[in-house]
Amino acid sequence: MTDAAPRAPLDLGRLQEAVGPTWTVRLFPTADSTNALAAGEPEPDVVVVADHQTAGRGRLGREWVTPAGAALTFSAVVDPGLADEWWPLVPLAAGLAVTAAVGGRLKWPNDVLMDGRKVCGILVERVAGRSDGKDVPLAVVGIGLNVDQAREELPVPTATSLALEGVAWGRAELLGAVLGELRTRLRTAAAAPAALVADYRSHCGTLGQDVRVDLPGGQELLGRAVDVDHHGRLVVQSGNETRAVAAGDVVHVRPQG
Ligand code: BT5
């Protein structure tokens, strides 16, 4: 990229207007991690946004790397009102919210891919908080969307940005769209979990693929992803056995030949 126009900084008034009165936006020109900030003092319906996130967290201690002004990095604190057994639907609802706003397909559980490349990563953390005067678990839904990066601004070759995929979004409007969809999907998760999972299945690019799943204990599972069950687990068929996986890193393996 040469002689690019300087990127306009995010503006609190525009962000707040875009997301509407049901959310309270806290904007930081620079922050280490919006998830860390949001989890530090979790308040339902607060959205922490960083114009430049300098130490973004991925899963399992990995990093989320974005340049100043080119990405949308935020964490929304929500009280999903779900019984424990349905909490695994929160990350799926977040992934669906992003695909509803921008398109793309989901790699289980919630990487958003365009043309097979990752445009958005999501990290959901569960923290203790209060809602309506009661002690409740709150979800910190951290979303990193590559909006305007040029190829050379992306940290890994498997990444892409909305701009590179020909999808033009202003960051404020994008925040409003994703948060609106997030509310809707979380409401569905609470009222009709089966409907949420059905919607998820139809947006999940992992289904039908040969996969390798790196499981939490260091084990590896090879097989075909055949379903997502009603609690959001990935069902993998390996030979004659099927196994439902609640957590793990999925690699889509290209079929041989
Ligand atoms: C994720 O982790 O995909 C979750 C990322 C969540 C980031 C958001 S930003 C707002 C909020 N605040 C935070 O501190 N975090 C959240 P994981 O599946 O572990 O993927 C991390 C891996 O993706 C890295 O090891 C890289 O390979 C790759 N990666 C890093 N930055 C990327 C980017 N900008 N675009 C695409 N891939 C990236």
Image: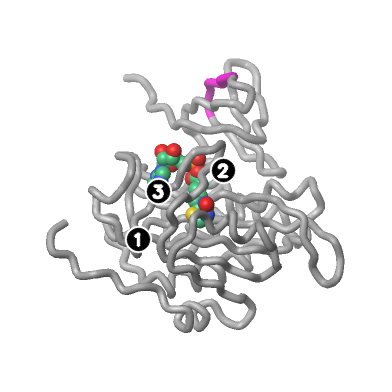
| Pointer 1 local density, CA inside 10 Å: few below 14, some 14–19, many at least 20 | some
**In the visual, does 102 lie left or right of 152?**
right
Which residue is painted at 56% across and 36% down in the image? 60
Which element is circle 2 on? loop
**What amino acid is found at the position of numbered circle 3 in the picture?**
Val
Which quarter of the rendered picture does the N terminus lie within?
bottom left
Nearest to N terminus: mark 3 or mark 2: 3
* 4 w.r.t. 22: above or below: above
Which residue is painted at 13% across and 64% down in the image? 3
Q: Quadrant of residue 20?
A: bottom right
Residue 90 in sight from this viewpoint: yes
Gap in angstroms between the C-alphas marked 1 and 2: 27 Å
Circle 3 residue: 65
Gap in angstroms between the C-alphas marked 3 and 1: 10 Å
Gap in angstroms between the C-alphas marked 3 and 2: 20 Å
Residue 143 in sight from this viewpoint: no
Kindly tell me whether mark 3's CB lies below 8 Å from ligand 1: yes
Circle 2 residue: 109
Q: Is residue 220 magenta?
A: yes
Nearest to N terminus: mark 1 or mark 2: 1
Q: Where does the image place residue 238, in percent across and percent down from the top left? A: 58, 19
**Magenta part of the chain:** 219-224
